[in-house]
Amino acid sequence: TKIYLSSPHMGGSEINYIQEAFDSNWIAPLGPNVTGFEESLENYLGNDTFIAALSSGTAALHLALILLGVERGDEVLCQSMTFSASANPIVYQGATPIFIDSEKDTWNLCPVHLEEAIKDRILKGKKPKVIIAVHLYGMPYKVDEINEVSKKYNIPIIEDSAESLGSTYKNKKCGTFGDLAILSFNGNKIITTSGGGALVSKNKDLKEKAIFLATQARDNAPHYQHSEIGYNYRLSNICAGIGKGQMEVLDSHVGLRREMNQFYKDIFFNTDTISVFTEPTNDFKSNHWLSCVTIDHSKSGFTSEDIRKALLKDNIESRPLWKPMHLQPVFKDAPYYGSTISEHIFNNGLCLPSGSNLSSSEKERIHKVLVKFANTK
Ligand SMILES: *Cc1c(COP(=O)(O)O)cnc(C)c1O
């Protein structure tokens, strides 16, 4: 049987909330599960957060850009090393992404190159509208440093927390740092609604505006009247039922993912050519959504591809890291600020199976393959 990188892991009560939806005939993109899931997320994140449950994390990013006034011709600063969904909504709005390199400690947005980009874009005649910062693989970005740049130039942050529900920075939860934040509940994320996302805001008006836009922007009238362009981005009451059940097991899933990270640290603890990606200081606590390694192939004599192929031989899925956006054919003309940090991480890294539902025999299979690479020192 195949071992997946990250597969859905149900807690058990999800099916009861779905049954409730059927019993009450709430088979719609609204209903008690949607409201209940939002409340559960608001309680979890705390800090007076207001959550709008949406059909995907991508939809949440799109609405976040709209709420921050991003329009045709604007420029948006975006972490280059990320999943394409962080950047695509910039293009939906007719704006231009400006990609920024990562720093080595967290693999996330480099505050130095971020400031360099802002200065240069202003010099070239246009001040960027928004910063999109990502907590990649669950690792918090350098929140204080990025916030400082954001404040200095008065540019709001969209915090892409799609991969980092349950992570913290200085004991504060990821998803609470940006002017707006987004979450994803896609099938491979730390909790899933089979497909879904959320927009996190700091006030009720923004939440209501997001829900208004997500439900076709209907004005308050008995007939269908519209003064704005709307979207069909609300979460289904069925999917939200899965989400309500998943919230009951979120903390335990974070614990299990972190155990997977320790599992890999134990395998490679004595190997100086393979590094398990880990928190730079105690200020950072990653949910370790995916555990990643980087290989120093000049010393090891093998590459991340060699490990990937060896795992695949035993039907174990692993995957190269996110290929930076500035290296993607579709974004080849977008401006880029930085050096080769993200490119280097991409070229030498690998994501390993990280699910919270891996059995001990599955871990044994993974161990068997990896230990061969660990002993080549
Ligand atoms: C998954 C993901 C998204 C998009 O979320 P969807 O719910 O799949 O649309 C956005 N950003 C990052 C970093 C992601 O990993």
Image (cartoon, helix red, strand yellow):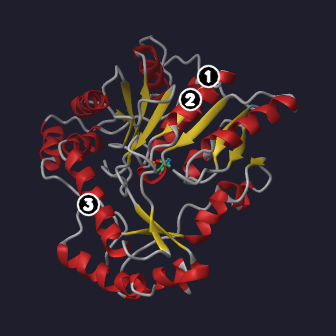
How far apart in space, not on screen, are marks 3 and 2 (Cα)?
Answer: 31 Å
The residue at 29%/44% (across/down) is 239
* Residue 315 in view (yes/no): no
Q: Dot 1: within a 10 Å radius of its alpha carbon, few (fewer than 14), some, or many (20 or more) residues?
A: few
Q: Does the Cβ of the disc 3 residue fall within 8 Å of ligand 1? A: no
**Element under disc 1:** helix
Q: Is residue 134 left or right of 359 when viewed as pictured?
A: right
How far apart in space, not on screen, are marks 1 and 2 (Cα)?
Answer: 6 Å
Q: Is residue 73 left or right of 43 when viewed as pictured?
A: right
Q: Is residue 252 left or right of 122 when viewed as pictured?
A: left
Residue in front for this viewpoint, 31 or 149: 149
How far apart in space, not on screen, are marks 3 and 1 (Cα)?
Answer: 37 Å
Q: Indicate which disc, 3 or 2, sits on the residue closer to the N terminus.
A: 2
Residue receiving disc 1: 151
Q: Dot 2: within a 10 Å radius of its alpha carbon, few (fewer than 14), some, or many (20 or more) residues?
A: some
Q: Indicate which disc, 3 or 1, sits on the residue closer to the N terminus.
A: 1
Q: Quadrant of residue 300?
A: bottom right
**At label 1, which amino acid type do we have?**
Lys
User: Where's residue 91, x and y in %?
Assistant: 68, 42
**At label 3, which amino acid type do we have?**
Glu
Relative to 143, say whether 346 is above or below: below
Residue receiving disc 2: 147
Q: Residue furthest top?
A: 221
User: Where's residue 57, x and y in %?
Assistant: 46, 43
The residue at 41%/12% (across/down) is 222
The residue at 47%/25% (across/down) is 210
Asked whether the beta carbons under mark 1 and mark 2 sit within 8 Å of each other, the answer is yes
The residue at 44%/49% (across/down) is 139
Q: Which mark is residue 259?
A: 3
